[in-house]
Image (cartoon, rainbow, N blue to C red):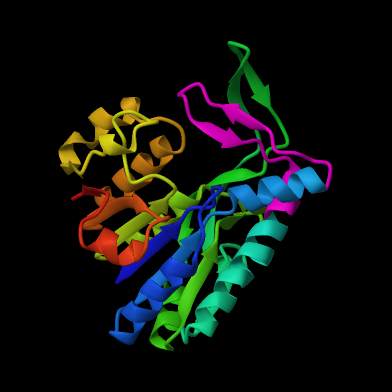
Amino acid sequence: MIVVKLGGGAGIGHAALVADVAALIAQGERLVLVHGTSHQANRLGERLGHPPRFVQSPTGFTSRYTDRQTLEIFMMAAAGLVNTTLVEALQRAGVNALGLSGIDGRLLAGQRKATIRVVEDGKPRVLRDDWTGTIEQVNAALLQSLLAAGYVPVVAPLAVSHAGEGLNVDGDRAAGAIAVALAADALVLLTNVPGLLRTLADESSLVPRIPRDALERWLPLAQGRMKKKLLGAGEALAGGVRRVVLADARRDAPLAAALAGSGTVIE
């Protein structure tokens, strides 16, 4: 059982991954694909006159501030364009994929963070009307029933609050939560860099292996989105997933390469 997260940043295509998924499914592997949406959501927001606003938490994490209009734009991009396009590509490759968001069937449920604390211009602030959340429950039975029926679930990174509200959630951590719920053998996080880099601008500075007990030492050194990827990796490993791989989505056969040990392997 493998859970794969395809990043949503600029420059990440899906043709090579789709071919890998088709090959694995033909070999009898079970797989869930989670995808990001950031680049498409940014483009759609710009076109609709509501560009993205990014904020930094007091602990140094950068995230999208999600007011209600931003959430609706994210829903359109995630559950609409990106999810459906991926499902279409997989169906063309002979994979019986089924697209859904974390809202459907309460697949991903958790607590809404109606207010968030941020740092802007060096000063702490509280932002209200936020529609992000943290995942507390995964409807594993729903995914297991789809897998047993021969489908490949393709999951958009949205969740539902306990009150039934739609939420924007971090895709890497969503993939990690799904991997834990399904007792996956591996979680593969595909992104637009080769893995964890010692120096952000130097792709030759790849860190190929991180022992699980050394992961916390790398968190303060990680930059940008990689902080959240390492956080998601740590949560997955703590939940029983045996191996997490941070790897490059831009190369040929990205999933096959990651499963063979290319990228940053944490186990």
x, y percentage for residue 137?
A: 46, 58
Q: Nearer the viewer, residue 106 or 200?
A: 200
Check the image and name the residue furthest to the right.
49
- Residue under the image location 32 percent in, 47 percent down: 233
- Tell me if residue 70 is in the magenta stretch: yes
Q: Nearer the viewer, residue 248 or 72?
A: 248
Location of residue 100 with respect to 132 vertically, above or below: below
Q: Nearer the viewer, residue 27 or 1?
A: 27
Q: How many marks?
A: 0
Location of residue 23 with respect to 82 vertically, above or below: below
Location of residue 181 with respect to 28 vertically, above or below: above
Which region of the structure is painted magenta?
A: 48-74
Rendered image quadrant of residue 206: top left
Q: Nearer the viewer, residue 72 or 165?
A: 72
- Residue under the image location 66 percent in, 38 percent down: 114
Q: Is residue 4 left or right of residue 131?
A: left
